[in-house]
Image: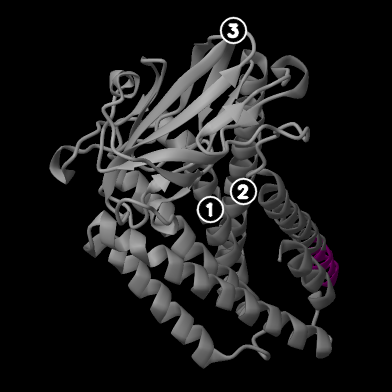
Amino acid sequence: MKKFIINFSVRKLSRMNYFYLLTFNLMKRLGFFLLIFHINFSSCNFINSTIQPLAKNGIINLGEYDFNTQGNIFLNGEWEFYWKRYYSYEDFINGNLIRSDLVILPGNWKNNKTLNSKIENYGYGTYLLKIISKNPINLFIKVNNIYGAYQITLNGDKVASNGTLSTIQQLNNPDRLLQINNFNLQAGENLVLLQASNFDFYRGGFGGIIIGSKEDIYDLYDKNIIIELFGAGALLILGFYHIGFSLRRNREKYLLYYGVFCILFSLRMIITGEAVFNNLFRTIPFELGIALEYLSFYLAAPFIVLYINELYPEDKHQKITTLFMIVTILLSLSIFILPMNYFSATIDFMRVVSILYIFYSSYIVIIAIRNKRHNSKTLGIIYLILI
């Protein structure tokens, strides 16, 4: 009788272990699928593939473009730019201007060559674009996630703004709230003025501006939100699931590392893109939101390396891993110690470190495949897709 009870308990335990392992493998594959799905589609703006008008010499001619059938367009290309000047609609009408430069939008100020003055990372200026339309059109504008303060006017009427503009840092107040607004293009020439300032980020400049019909603009926004919330929610569940699983299997730390990585990636998804986090929690200080965005990036990369190292401990290089950890910790500490305009300058260096992470992790996976480690081929295929 005692032997039967022991055998029954062993069989029951084996079935439970099989169930947990089966569930874990399914959840792990779902996690990798979500990462691939997010990387490939979360940054997609679902703009129609039709050839779109492009701004040249500060002018964009819509010509025969039909927003109802051809979809949204970006106001990309060459804009007139007036560095260290806040010009109004009346200034352009009256001609009270200095000679302008041409800069590419979207883009950073530092990356543009100018005729009149040297553009720096910190400062302010006015962009000008002339839109030529054959007919009056009622449209909507969507301003992508922008780090800074700005105001956009069309023919003198404000159509979008964020934060508080100023010529000095102490009075400048950046923000990242969603901007989708209605405006009317008149037949003929329309003047779009974009006043922008940056005193808080290492690279000043401006992102994309999208215009289109009400249905297409909100459809674009809804699709982006669905992708981001679905991906973030699923990754959050995966993260807590794997952390909980790691508590039952204390020796398998890779479960914990993978869970933490999923949670950090989930946080990053709702902070970037459509900035769901900022629009839901508007009382949270702007600086805290930026710090969380940087931390979710800086800390996520090392956890995926720790995950792979734990899966294949025989193939890892401990000295390289330790060096990566030290660099990442120092960069993360800079977010708490340095002002925003200083720690934001570390992002380029962290991108280089992340590339090195990818090369190192890929090397470990290749060695694991060569040594015929368990599940190494499957992980290798997933890594190739992610890269």
Left or right for 157, reference 12: left
Crowding near pointer 2: few (<14 within 10 Å), some, many (20+)? many
Which quadrant of the view contains residue 53? top right
Crowding near pointer 1: few (<14 within 10 Å), some, many (20+)? many
Q: Earlier in the sequence, mark 2 or mark 3?
A: 3
- The secondary structure type at the circle numbered 3 is loop
Foreground pick, 58 / 297: 58
At label 3, the amino acid type is: Pro
Q: Earlier in the sequence, mark 3 or mark 1?
A: 3
- Circles 1 and 2: CB distance less than 8 Å? yes
Let me know if residue 231 appears in the view: yes
Is residue 2 rendered magenta in the image?
A: yes
Foreground pick, 166 / 282: 166
Identify the main secondary structure in magenta.
helix
Which quadrant of the view contains residue 323? bottom left
Q: Which residue is mark 1?
A: 263
The circle drawn on residue 235 is 2
Residue sitting at 81 percent across and 90 percent down? 371
The circle drawn on residue 23 is none
**Image spot of residue 271 (x, y percent):** 47, 43
Left or right for 260, reference 35: left
Q: Which residue is mark 3?
A: 136
Query: Magenta segment, which residues?
Result: 1-14
**Image spot of residue 117 (x, y percent):** 29, 53
Q: CA distance from mark 2 to mark 3?
A: 45 Å
